[in-house]
Image (cartoon, rainbow, N blue to C red):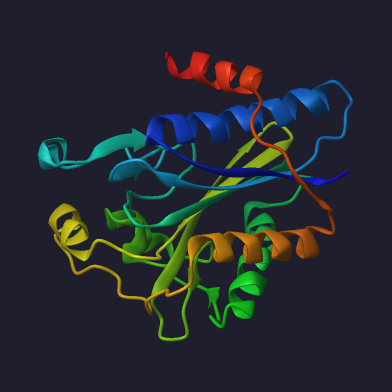
Amino acid sequence: MFLRVIPSIQTTGQVQMAIDLWLLNQLNQQIDRGCTPNPVLRFYTWSKPTISLGYHQKKYPDRWDQLPVDIVRRPTGGRAVLHDGDLTYAVIMPSAGKTHRDSYCDICRFLVQGWRSLDRELTFGSAGRGYIHNPSCFGTATAADLITTNGEKFIGSAQLHRGHGILQHGSMLLNINQALFTEIFSAPAPNPPKVEIKPEIIITTLTQAASNCFGLEIMEQPLSEEEVKEVQGGTGR
């Protein structure tokens, strides 16, 4: 087994979500055939400012449709996230019968370890069920999220458990557009310590941390032309 690392892709939110969901479906198909699938790690950015809605977040303000942003629904839960200047990660792996909480802890270890080596200490949030009343994912920090030493939410994550697999993806606030955030959510933007590190260094560091935490060798493997066609077929493109 190895950790399949898909090189960073910048494209629309619709395509990014389709890739994540397609990778989870492929993992389940491999398990159903009796194969042992390789976990997948990828990092990506968004080609234009985008609001991603949690799967169960059925309503949002009408005025969002008038803003210069795309709106896309995630296959995972949680609240709305503004993607503009952030870096998103995705991990797709077998669930191995783990609970949501245990799998969050296991997967997030690589984020904690990686950012520690980049001189940023992160711990889990502690907000309760009240988060569902906040339209912004970054308005509260639950046990699925990672916060800085000054209490600011830095990484918001969400999961989908389907079949034998887990999709966990999340947003890291590298360079938040504070004015746009305030316009969207009518609330002050999060203000974690500014990240001065180049994204490629962050990706390399977190990838190595994932390799260490998951105990798997790294195999960089871009999406093949056939895989891209399958993903595009699922998005109607």
Question: Does residue 100 sit above or below 146 in this rendering?
Answer: above
Quadrant assignment for the C terminus? top left
Q: Which residue: 81% across, 28% down?
A: 31
Q: Residue at x 45, y 30 (%)?
A: 15
Does 82 sit above or below residue 75?
Answer: below
Residue 179 seen: yes
Place residue 23 in its image quadrant: top right
From the viewer's perspective, is 51 left or right of 122? left
Residue at the extreme bottom: 150
- Identify the image quadrant of residue 231: top right
Total marks drawn?
0
Find residue 30 and report its horizontal and vertical position in percent.
80, 26
Tell which of 189 and 127 is nearer to you.
189
Q: Is residue 224 left or right of residue 149?
A: right
Residue at 84% over, 53% down: 217
Residue 179: percent from left, percent from top: 16, 62
* Vertical side of 91 occupied by 205: above or below: below
Q: Is residue 162 left or right of residue 134?
A: right
Residue 49 vs 235, above or below: the answer is below
